[in-house]
Every structure is written in C-alpha cells, then in structure tokens.
Image (spheres, grey):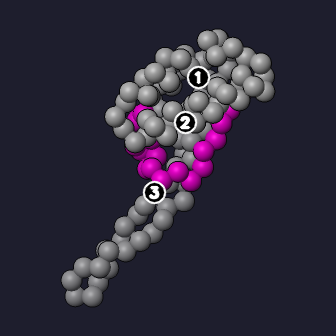
Amino acid sequence: MKAVLRQIRISPKKANLIAGLVRGKDVEEALTMLKFMPKKGAKILYKVLHSATSNAENNMGQNRGDLEIKKILVTKGATYKRHNPISRGRAQPILKRTSHITVEVGAK
C-alpha cells in the first residue's frame, strides 16, 4: 500500500535527507527513528509513513510487524515565488520550494 503527500512546504533536498535514513527499513524501526529525530522533515515523513501502514492494515489486512518500506520518493513540487524589497527600489527573489512525498510499504 502507499500514501502520497503533495505540495508540502519543505524543500525536496531537506526531505530527501531524512528519507534516505529510513529507506528500506522495517516500518516499526523507521517510525521509531522518525519520532525522535529533531528535524521538520522527520515529522512530515512520520505522518506519511504512518498513513501508508494504516492503509496496509485496514485495506489489505496486513500485520504491521511484517511490513517494510519498499519505496520512498521525494520529488519537486511547485515553487512559490516571493520578493523581498532591498535598496534603491529593487526586489530580491525568494523561492519557497515544495515537495511531493510518496511512501510505499509492503510485506517482507
């Protein structure tokens, strides 16, 4: 089963750092790691992974202990463009990047 979170306000580079740490691990181990990690991306990934495991339990009748992470994909979403005023009437661009996160879990 899988879960998808789209247009989340974190840059893909930062989210991919956290995803790389839990990629390929057991679901229980990954959830524990993410729960105690002091990063913004860890909280977001925890929610998506928890949703994917709940989908597997409720829709497919899987046991949580038998699940592992098959695939975590972090892709680039839309970029919000903002401007910061600077001297002489000019504007400095600010790029607020977003991500799409896909988590797929399956039986071992």
Say whether disc 2 or disc 3 marks the residue closer to the N-terminus: 2
- Residue 38 figure quarter: top left
| Residue type highlighted by circle 3 | Arg
Q: How many marks?
A: 3
Q: Is residue 77 in view from this perspective?
A: yes
Residue 62, above or below 76: above
Who is closer to the viewer here, 74 or 2?
2
Say whether disc 1 or disc 3 marks the residue closer to the N-terminus: 1
Q: Is residue 59 left or right of residue 81?
A: right
Q: Which residue is mark 2?
A: 47
Give the secondary structure at mark 3.
strand
**Closer to us: mark 1 or mark 2?**
2
Label 2 Cα crowd, 10 Å radius (few <14 / some 14-19 / many 20+): some
Residue 106 in the image, given as x and y percentages of width and height: 67, 20
Residue 60 in the image, given as x and y percentages of width and height: 78, 22
| Residue type highlighted by circle 1 | Ile
Segment tinted magenta in the rendering: 1-18
Residue 85 in the image, given as x and y percentages of width and height: 29, 79
Say whether disc 1 or disc 2 marks the residue closer to the N-terminus: 2
Mark 2–mark 3 Cα distance, whole angstroms, equals 20 Å
Mark 1–mark 2 Cα distance, whole angstroms, equals 14 Å
Q: Which mark is residue 69?
A: 1
Mark 1–mark 3 Cα distance, whole angstroms, equals 26 Å
Name the residue furthest left.
87
Residue plotted at (60% across, 49% down): 6
Residue plotted at (47% across, 32% down): 19
Residue 79, above or below 26: below
| Residue type highlighted by circle 2 | Lys
Label 3 Cα crowd, 10 Å radius (few <14 / some 14-19 / many 20+): some
Q: Which residue is mark 3?
A: 97
